[in-house]
Amino acid sequence: MNCKIKLISSVYIVLCLLLLSSCLSNKKYVYLQNMSTHKVDSTSDYIKINKPNYHLQISDILSINIASEDESVSKIFNAAPATMGNMNMMPGGVGGMMYYNGVGVNDSGNIVLPIVGNIYVLGKTLSEANAAIRLELNKYFKNYHLTVQFSEFRCSVIGEVTRPGKYSFLQNQVNILEVLAHVGDLTPLANRLKVSIIRQYPEGLKIHQVNLTDARLLESPYYFLKPNDVIYVEPIKMRELGNLTSAQNTLTTIATVASTFLLVLNTYIIFKSK
């Protein structure tokens, strides 16, 4: 009889441990693990930012602002700002407004400005494009201030995220964690160990992969996104066997019922042995 009691008790303990392990197994869900490789809150050590320069491509939209004491010059180059009334009527909200007020890089790699005409900017960085535009403006104008930046930072997010879609940011620098926060984070079914970034280059497309659970992501050249990037979050392999959440719930239910049954059985055997 004692052997039976010990056996049942052992099985009960094992089931409890399995139940706890299923609840605590989150290694594949926690972002930026291995932080011990960096000195957290250190005042002297910083994580080195690896941010390659972006080179302008066809269909990029630039915001070009030319300010001058001569109001006629400013009126020629600077479009009137959209009002809040008509902003919401444009595709994509603010992004749509910036699209219509911006200057696009055409199929020939040029932007077209009034009076100045075509200026070739394809493959140039923003600072190089600024210099090229300034060189042409100097032929016609003096005493002006030129600002060149992206009208909007566009990227797309698809796959296992809460709100997949195409998004626009009114800033020149966006990192992958910002974008994932904006879309409501990943779903429980997302494979955080292998997130793909589809990036456009002058020669064609390339696919890069990052691991969101590794703190070394912060040092990756793909931590900071580039305009027109597409982020694809694939599902984990458990998806092939059905919904992971349902499977976890089923396992938890089975373990709970089994442990309850064994507890009752163990109590009954102890009672009968007296």
Image (cartoon, grey):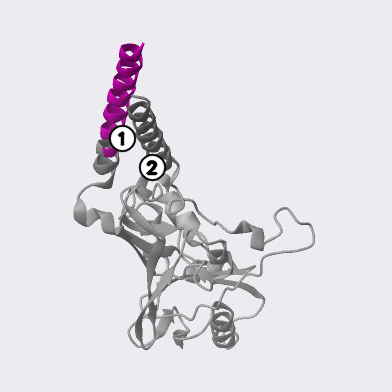
Mark 2 residue crowding within 10 angstroms, few (<14) / some (14–19) / many (20+): few
164 relative to 60 in the view: left or right: left
Task: Give the mark nearest the N terminus, 2 or 1.
Answer: 2
Q: Amino acid at mark 2?
A: Ser
Q: What predominant SS class does the magenta segment belong to? A: helix
Q: Write the residue at 42% across / 67% down.
A: 102
Regarding mark 2 in the picture, which secondary structure is present there?
helix
Q: Which residue is at the front of the view, 253 or 225?
A: 253
Q: Which residue is at the front of the view, 89 or 180?
A: 180
Relative height, residue 136 to residue 76 (above, below): below
Q: Is residue 64 visible?
A: no
Q: Write the residue at 71% across / 59% down.
A: 39
The residues tagged by marks 2 and 1 sit, at their Cα atoms, a distance apart of 8 Å
Q: Which mark is residue 32?
A: none
Q: What residue range appears in magenta?
A: 251-274
Q: Amino acid at mark 1?
A: Thr
Q: Write the residue at 27% across / 47% down.
A: 244
Location of residue 219 in the rendering, given as x and y in whole percent from the top left corner: 59, 69
Q: Quadrant of the N terminus?
A: top left
- Whether the magenta-drawn stretch holds residue 116 is answered as no
Relative height, residue 236 to residue 139 (above, below): above
Location of residue 55 in the rendering, given as x and y in whole percent from the top left corner: 48, 81
Q: Are marks 2 and 1 in contact (CB under 8 Å)?
A: yes
Q: Quadrant of residue 259?
A: top left
Q: Give the residue at mark 2.
A: 22
Q: Quadrant of the C terminus?
A: top left
Q: Give the residue at mark 1.
A: 252
